[in-house]
Amino acid sequence: MQGGEAMSSELSLTSAAVVAVVALLAPLVVRLTRLRVPAVVLEILLGIVIGPQVLGWAHVDTPVRVLSVVGLGFLLLLAGLEIDFDGLRGRTLRLTSAAFVLSFALAVATGLVLDALGLVRSPLLIAVILSATSLGVILPVLKDSGQLGTSFGQVVVAGASIAEVVPIVLLSLIFSEDAPGLVAQLTLLAAFLAFIVAVGLLILGAERSSRISQALLALQDTTAQIRVRGAMALLMMFVALATTFGLEAILGAFLAGATLKLLDRDRAMTHTMFHMKLQAIGFGAFVPFFYVSTGMALDVRSLGDPSTWARVPLFLAALLLARAVPAVMYRPLAQRPGQVVAAGLLQATSLGIPVVAGAVGVELGVIRPENYVALVAAGLLSVALFPLLALPRLTGPTPSTGPDAQRGPRPIGP
């Protein structure tokens, strides 16, 4: 009893309660005031306001930190679930891969220029950050515009998927803490991937067992919520193993989602609510803690330095250069005027990797705190502005001339 009382006196949930209230209010405010920005932007901004550098109502203490780490894991799990593996093949894969190679080359060149100007310490880490796209942010934009199911929308999603996977892998390989070297890291990555394949085959074999399959079906909507528990176990196991293999935990979380996506091929549609349940747990409970605590931890006082403010538009322009310019390669597949511009704007929408990779860079001492703040501010602006600018170009008038005008989008063949 005394041990329990001591723990209660040392562990306070006050900050966690404040963050939970902010997480509740942010989407309500966006909806009621009709702000044309994603709720995540307001969550980070409100995190800054309630954090120790402004009002001081909440701090990133142990409960908030733990919930934030779980939130980041869920965010990347859900990002892995969004990958369209069926679309990542044939001509689509070749086109989007070539566009990403160009994007990364532009990002490296930009990083080298910034390094030569003395603005960054690690041009390669900046290149990884600039080459990323937030798939989870642009998917609703494509869906609302009716482009998600079109051939052009599929290309944008495929390009964004590559731009989410590759930066995470590069971040884990090159910038993991206590990294033993690239060759050793590649060996560990190969071993980790082999383990994931083995786990996937084990799960696939178990689901093909009629006895186990019937048990899963019977328990999935009871208080056991067996599929959700399985997803949670997979997430925690992959994250723990990734750190054991010397890789970044975020890679394990992302691959957990990708594994679920590959294995969850329910043709009979017997568990249609599975993904919705995971989204409810992630976005409804844990992910907001990550975004709000990110705002709380930002060193916003460094924004008082004019040089920090000056870097925000610089990093925003760098995002446009690295991610928007390669969208010109999608021009043969565009169906409406301005779609290529829209695709470029959407691909330059990036917040998750600047937040995560920037934090890793600060921990490793290769990104200065003021640069991290400027990078996150640029990411916030990209999320707030670019989808808003892209939407009218996605929903513009369809060309009405020519024999193919009424045939709809051209299919993308292999």
Image: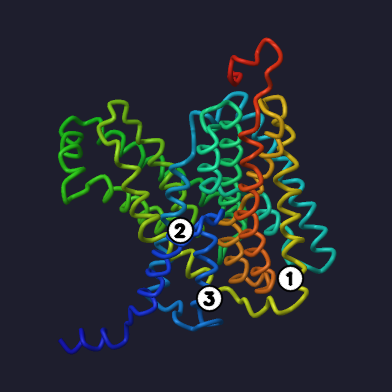
- Label 3–label 1 contact, CB within 8 A: no
Characterize the local packing of mark 1: few (<14), some (14-19) or many (20 or more) Cα atoms within 10 angstroms: some
Seen at 61% across and 77% down, the residue is 299
Q: Earlier in the sequence, mark 3 or mark 1?
A: 3
The three-letter code of the residue at mark 1 reads Trp
**Are the residues at dot 1 and dot 2 in contact (C-beta closer than 8 Å)?**
no
Task: Identify the colour scheme used.
Answer: rainbow
Whole-angstrom CA distance, mark 3 to mark 1, is: 18 Å
- Towards the viewer: 179 or 221: 221
Which image quarter is the N terminus in? bottom left
Residue topped by disc 1: 309
**Residue 294 appears at what percent x and percent y?**
52, 68
Q: Mark 3 points at which residue?
A: 49
Marks 3, 2: nearer the viewer: 2
State how many labels appear.
Answer: 3
- Above or below residue 222? Residue 8 is below
- Picture residue at 58% right of the left edge, 67% below the top: 359
> Residue 32, which numbered label?
2
Give the secondary structure at mark 2. Answer: helix
